[in-house]
Amino acid sequence: MALAERFREFSIAHVLANRATTDPQRPYLLHRDRSATFGEIEGDAEALAAALANLGVEEKDRIAILLPPCPEFVVTAFAAAKLGAVVVPLDPLLTRTELQYMLRHSEATVAVTVEDFRERDYLQLFEELFPLLPELQYLVTVGEEDLWYDDRIFQFEDLLSSGVGRDFRGPEVDPEEDLFAIAYTSGVTGKPKGVELTHRNLIHAAAATADALGLTPDDRIIGVTALFHVFGLSPGMLGTALAGASLILQEEFDGGEALDLVERHGATVHYGVPTVFATQLREQRAHPRRLSSLRMGVVAGAPVTDEFLREVRSTLCPNLRVAYSLTETSSTLAVTEGGDPDGKKRFTVGRPISQTEVRVLEEDGTLLPVESLGEIAVKGPGVMRGYYRQPGETSRSFAAEGFFRTGDLGILDEDGYIHLVGRRKEVIIRGGYNVHPREVEDRLHAHPAVVEAVVVGVPDEILGETICAAVVPVEGAIITEGELQQWCGTTLADHKVPDRVRLLEELPLTGTGKVRRVELARMLRSELEEKGMES
């Protein structure tokens, strides 16, 4: 029986309890030099749930988690599920302003955080935030510091120990209706929104992804660089548990270390955003590892080119799949499969996962026929309940018959495969012409001296917007702005050729490896304004 059907009526707490009953000694998490079994994680989650209940944490309370990929994140998530609480997974590298906004907006009563990470003192940070967050009652920290001086702060291990052997009352959870997570969108193209995801939403996306990939208990999965991201939470943490497989955790992504872990643990499945695979390609070329254990990879989170796919398949993962993943759909809504025709594997993001329907709509919501370019809309068990505390935004995001409007432009071909073109809101209007950044980026990526390229629009008094490209060149490459503009001009119309090309050592990224387009556009605009003032 497919996992999506087998676990259809389960809550997230029941997923772990079921696996701990059937396979208690099977390794679930591989972290540093430790292996934690399903039975051990279940026991820790029970103890933490009891300890939190003793502090007064109740059903529907919000528990924010600010941790890198580590066992404590997984234990906290399942403990919250046992209490019927709602997790708010947050990037620990958020700015103070972003963190304050999300903690306050979600009305978190408990925050579980690392004590220090990347030279940042989180105890000091929360000491400053406590007076500004009236709903926040407790802080639980992962680390070694003695926190006896504040009765609102608990060390994770101490709290865990206090709950061992204690009973607590777990509520009856309705997987279809009850929330499990408020996952904030990254804010790459606008203000972050809290996406309401139910137990059913996340379990379906995780199970359907695992089914599409053919995951088994023998698989060892690597590449989940952010458990706070919906892909890490759903196919990563939950999908691994549903399949009875093992998840290799790496707290801070390093391409060389990741390849070492593949070799050491015999990883069989590799997840990742394009940046992860691009970093590993360079590392593998410089210092080759034995990667024969990898049977497949899955790339999601940003567009990829045909050339990139070929390189990853030949150098890292022989069977690299492409997935289409959104926070609002609990992660995966489509993925390519092993039996797909070669052209579909190379130029599409696959077909929708089970029980998921995709349509292409005109801007006014009119249904378009196959092979038409329009906005991708999706309906299925993985689609969010709505945006937290934003009923107006929620209403605007849904079309007739409950189809969620993704904001992505694409084509649904006659075989049911999805071809992505770009974001509707990212269209650059230059001199009256609509320019889709993806088309220009694909051309730049095809240049042998280009590793990464991102195209954004910058306001202009005459043209409305100008086309600006930020390019990361191959190490050691010698390339100029004029050469890249000429390269684009050989295949693109004149109005699509970048007005400016900026060469960078690296692109500004979110914690999940996506490019911060708003920040990049702001930087390029500032540089153009300074240049104009100087002239």
Image (cartoon, grey):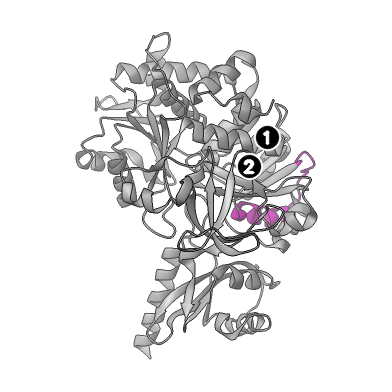
Lateral position of residue 294 relative to residue 94, left or right: right
Provide the residue designation for mark 1: 211
Residue type (three-letter) at the residue carrying disc 2: Ile
Relative to 530, say whether 218 is above or below.
above
Q: Residue at x 63, y 73 (%)?
A: 444
Whether label 1 touches label 2, CB < 8 Å: yes
> Could you say which is closer to the camera, residue 467 or residue 358?
358
* Amino acid marked by disc 1: Asp
Helix, strand or loop status at disc 1:
helix
Q: Is residue 311 above or below residue 146?
A: below
The stretch drawn in magenta includes residue 342: no
Magenta span? 274-295
| Residue position marked by numbered label 2 in the rendering | 353
Q: Residue at x 53, y 24 (%)?
A: 9
Q: Residue at x 43, y 70 (%)?
A: 521
Quadrant of the image occupied by residue 4: top right
